[in-house]
Image (cartoon, coloured by chain):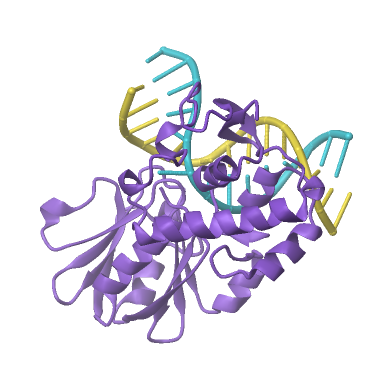
Chain colours: A purple, B cyan, C yellow
DNA sequence: TGTGATGTTGAATG
DNA sequence: GCATTCAACATCAC
């Protein structure tokens, strides 16, 4: 699930549950997703610390610690967090959990283990090392248009590239193409200025709406592609037919025959 | 049983 | 240096 709106929802959940509490210990069941140290070291670094805030950029959530360091939570394809007290509520694929002194814990669940957890002493150095583009909901229209001028290639590849723009993933990229009625394989160097502005406006509208709905997709409008990712679907305006193909290396549902 | 899945990275190629 | 393609990562669900 985790694209920008989902990670935004995780952030709100994290802020509402995990801040300003002493971490009594960290239980690490599987340290595969902790990428820059082993589980014991990670637990050692976090013990007796507390989280004081968080910062999200794209799909990256940085948890701020009271010593000025950060913990990166990147959810990969299947990451999730759950705050609970009863051990019976432990997520099935919990890889580690921050155990707070109030008896509750924040478990990090991740069946596929594609998540990336890092203990960071220098947040900015890490972001610079990626490098990570501006957040898709914080970039200005002027900067977005200027960025587009410097790139070429397929629209969907651009939207998915986190170095250019951070936060849009496979499903929201398809949603943007669907709602703008611009083909995901369109070459960005051939888009008109109006089309470029339309993409920006649509991206803002879609991501803001999803954030507002806390990424609860069942509340998404019927005229979104979201629940119609099925070949053969014809939108209400009768423009095109939904087709499935691989574009920019990812499974893509798009309107064919525009 | 085989296939594909909301992400990222690194290697190879053009 | 860019853009593109593909394999790899690991597990589950259909």
The answer to which of A63 and C4 lies nearer the viewer is: C4
Q: From this view, report whether residue A77 is shown above or below residue A5.
A: above
Question: How far from the left and from the top, in percent, is residue A115?
Answer: 45, 53
Determine which quarter of the picture holds residue A101: bottom left
* Residue A175 visible in this rendered orientation of the protein: yes
Q: Which residue is found at the position 53% from the left and 60% from the top?
A: A204
Q: Which residue is found at the position 42% from the left and 57% from the top?
A: A209
Q: From this view, report whether residue A128 is shown above or below residue A186.
A: below
Q: In this view, does A7 lie to the left or right of C6?
A: left
Question: How far from the left and from the top, in percent, is residue A14?
Answer: 31, 68
Q: From this view, report whether residue A226 is shown above or below residue A83.
A: above
The answer to which of A6 and A92 lies nearer the viewer is: A6
* Residue A162 visible in this rendered orientation of the protein: no
Q: Residue furthest bottom?
A: A67
Question: How far from the left and from the top, in percent, is residue A245?
Answer: 60, 27
Question: How far from the left and from the top, in percent, is residue A106?
Answer: 25, 64
Q: Which residue is found at the position 37% from the left and 47% from the top?
A: A220
Q: How many labels does the image show?
A: 0
Determine which quarter of the picture holds residue A239: top right
Q: Quadrant of the C terminus of chain A?
A: top right
Q: Is residue A3 left or right of residue A174?
A: left
Q: Which residue lies furthest to the front in this view?
A: A237
The answer to which of A224 and A123 lies nearer the viewer is: A224
Q: Which residue is found at the position 56% from the left and 25% from the top?
A: A243
């Amino acid at each position: 699930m985790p694209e920008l709106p989902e990670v935004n929802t995780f952030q709100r959940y994290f802020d509402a549950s995990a801040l300003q509490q002493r971490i009594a210990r960290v239980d690490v069941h599987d340290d595969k997703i902790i990428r820059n140290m082993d589980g014991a070291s990670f637990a050692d670094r976090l013990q007796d610390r507390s989280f004081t805030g968080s910062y999200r950029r794209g799909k990256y959530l940085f948890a701020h610690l009271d010593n000025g360091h950060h913990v990166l939570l990147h959810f990969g394809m299947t990451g999730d967090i759950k705050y609970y007290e009863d051990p019976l509520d432990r997520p099935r694929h919990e890889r580690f959990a921050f155990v707070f002194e109030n008896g509750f814990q924040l478990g990090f669940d991740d069946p596929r283990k594609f998540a990336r957890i890092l203990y960071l002493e220098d947040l900015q150095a890490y972001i610079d090392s990626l490098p990570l583009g501006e957040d898709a909901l914080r970039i200005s229209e002027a900067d977005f248009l200027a960025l587009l001028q410097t790139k070429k290639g397929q629209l969907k590849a651009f939207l998915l590239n986190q170095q250019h723009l951070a936060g849009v993933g496979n499903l929201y990229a398809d949603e943007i193409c669907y709602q703008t009625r611009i083909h995901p394989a369109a070459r960005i160097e051939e888009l008109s200025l109006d089309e470029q502005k339309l993409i920006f406006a649509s991206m803002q509208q879609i991501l803001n709406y999803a954030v507002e709905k806390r990424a609860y997709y069942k509340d998404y409008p019927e005229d979104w592609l979201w629940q119609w990712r099925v070949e053969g679907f014809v939108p209400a305006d009768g423009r095109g037919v939904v087709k499935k193909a691989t574009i920019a290396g990812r499974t893509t549902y798009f309107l064919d025959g525009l």
